[in-house]
Image (cartoon, rainbow, N blue to C red):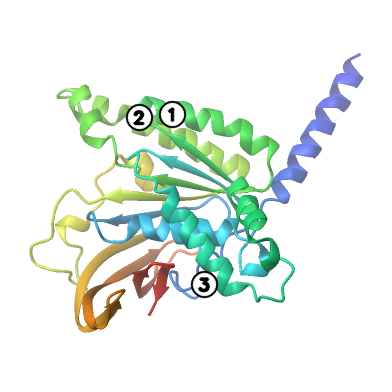
Amino acid sequence: MRSLNIRLKSALCFKLFARLEARRCLKDIEPRLFPEDGGPDHGEVVELYGMEGTGKTELLYHLLCRCVLPNAAGGLEVDVVFVDTDYSLDMLRLVSILESRLNTALPTSSPLASSEEAVLRSCLSRLLVVHCSSSSQLLLTLHFLETSLSSRPSLGLLLIDSISAFYWLDRCEGGASLTKQEEKLSKCSELLDRLLRDYRITVFATCHAIRRSLTGRSSSSCPESDRPYLCRPWQRLVTHRLLCSRQEAENNMAPTSGGNKERKRRHVFTVHCTSSTSSSRTKAYRSSSFYVTDGGVEFI
């Protein structure tokens, strides 16, 4: 009986190991955002940091579409979990971007082009959306996520928009004790750390800046508004940090639906990436810029 139990446990371990090995690496999820060494590897965390209106959520939509789209349309065919803590996920916007990508990528002669609705449904079937309204719900969601990770090797990306949503609520509930204020997010970070190690997923999370920069960005030092403020367990998880900002391009005008005579000013969004992976002791940097169009993010 004992030998039978050992064989069963060995078989289960072998199956789990095979599932983990099959999980897709996302280093190539968006080469234009990350240094030449590549994007996030298995078990790494990317934080998108910036003020409201700096393109963080649009970047998440861009990455989400890249994952759920079929290979024929330039996608990775990876399942995605989107944790919406701000209740700001715009499904109509997401579907619009997917349709635009499919129309652009698939020629009319492609077999997939004739069944665009079926392809779109297939893309959306790779997406699981979860809503959270507190840090306690986020912790429960991460516990629930472990079941999905162990049974779905195609699930490779976790998106959290945003990880800082309950910062002020937790501070109020924690009273004067900093430990109590950070207790819930620390527990979430510790659980997430284990999921990253055990299931080798990749995480992208937005984080809202709570201080507005008054002096502009400096290349020699980190402005006060850009400094991490979430708990230490979360900061230790982050391997890639994308600082997002927005500027109005004076010489860049985009035509509106009213015709060429009526034009609107278009914003340029800038991303400064700092990568410090576990495999390299040195930091790597990259800057990129993009517009937000009806069809999603368009890099310059």
Can you tell which mark lies on residue 139? 1
Circle on res. 37: 3
Disc 2 residue type (three-letter): Ser
Residue 76 in picture, x, y percent from top left: 63, 61
Q: Are marks 1 and 2 in contact (CB under 8 Å)?
A: yes
Q: Secondary structure at mark 2?
A: helix
Query: What residue did someone put label 2 on?
Result: 135
In the image, residue 171 sits, relative to residue 245, either above or below, namely above
- Identify the residue at horizontal 13%, vertical 60% (top origin): 213
Q: Which amino acid does the dot numbered 3 rest on? A: Asp
- Tag 1: residue type? Leu
Secondary structure of residue under mark 3: loop
Image point (22%, 80%), residue name: 262
Q: Residue 65 location in percent, x, y?
A: 52, 59
Q: Position of residue 216 (x, y in %)?
A: 13, 68
**Closer-to-camera residue (177/249):** 249
Do the residues under discs 3 and 2 have CB atoms within 8 angstroms? Answer: no
Q: Quadrant of residue 9?
A: top right
Disc 3 and disc 1: Cα gap in Å? 33 Å
Of pointers 3 and 2, the one earlier in the residue sequence: 3
Q: Earlier in the sequence, mark 3 or mark 1?
A: 3
Label 3 neighbour load within 10 Å: few <14, some 14-19, many 20+: few
